[in-house]
Image (cartoon, grey):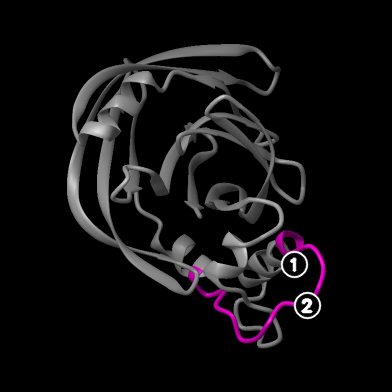
Amino acid sequence: MKNPLIFVAFSALVACGPLVEGNTASKVSAAVKSRFTQPDAEAIPTYTFADLAASEIPVILAAVPSLEVADVFQKIGSNGNQETWISSIGMTITLDGGIVVATRGFGEDIYAADTRGLSAALRRGTGTYSRRIEQLDSSDDVIRMEFSCELETVGQDQVTILDRSFGATKLQETCRSEDVAFANYYWVNGSRDVVQSQQWLGKSVGHAATQQF
């Protein structure tokens, strides 16, 4: 699964001038959504990698094409290595080392996810492991799914986040259960931190794309 247009839209938010005072994250959130709803508008403000990296509130970029969502998610809390981020309309994503472990407000949500095998494989660049993903259906019932997964290194790639490009290692994760199969992609830097990803959230929602600073 690959959605380059998501990252093109993110990268279109290149600065054309200094920011005015106020909540940088909120301003950028409005600009990101405007790029998706008004791609030809000339008056939409744009921002740089440095602007978001220096935001008074830590932020990530995230998009879910099936829901027509593209937004700046602001950090609202952490628990150990897990960090929770919220969009301007109240959707939340919880990441553990860049891996999605929970979502809320997406209609079909991840209640919890086991990341131990994947985290170890990301550090090594390869591996086979089992994953459990627990989903919340529309009735808030928990559905548990067990997957057999494999991670492999695809190769070196160029990542562009807003106005900044840098090299990263691209990895592909392939997971299968008895009736579900999906592929995720992760781009990691030299410190093995996930800087960009495309991750499966469920049969109905499909994939989410993230970029981190």
CB-based contact (under 8 Å), mark 2 and mark 1: yes
Point 49% across, 70% down: residue: 11
Q: Classify mark 1: residues with Cα within 10 Å, few (<14), some (14-19) or many (20+).
A: some
Residue at numbered disc 1: 27
Image height of 116 relative to 53, above or below: above
Which mark sits nearer the N-terminus, 2 or 1? Answer: 2
- Residue placed most toward the observer, 14 or 204: 14
For the magenta stretch, what is the residue range?
A: 11-26
Q: In the shown orientation, is residue 195 left or right of residue 71? A: left
The verdict on residue 117 being magenta is: no
| Residue 125: % across, % down | 21, 36
Residue 20's mark? 2
Q: In the shown orientation, is residue 95 left or right of residue 29? A: left
Point 52% across, 66% down: residue: 10
Point 56% across, 73% down: residue: 48
| Residue 163: % across, % down | 47, 74
- Residue placed most toward the observer, 167 or 1: 167
Q: In the shown orientation, is residue 13 left or right of residue 5? A: right
Image height of 22 relative to 109, above or below: below
Q: Image quarter for residue 181? A: top left
Looking at the image, the residue that sits furthest to the right is 22
Disc 2/disc 1 C-alpha distance (Å):
9 Å
Q: Main secondary structure of the magenta part?
A: loop
Q: Classify mark 2: residues with Cα within 10 Å, few (<14), some (14-19) or many (20+).
A: few
The amino acid sitting under disc 2 is: Val
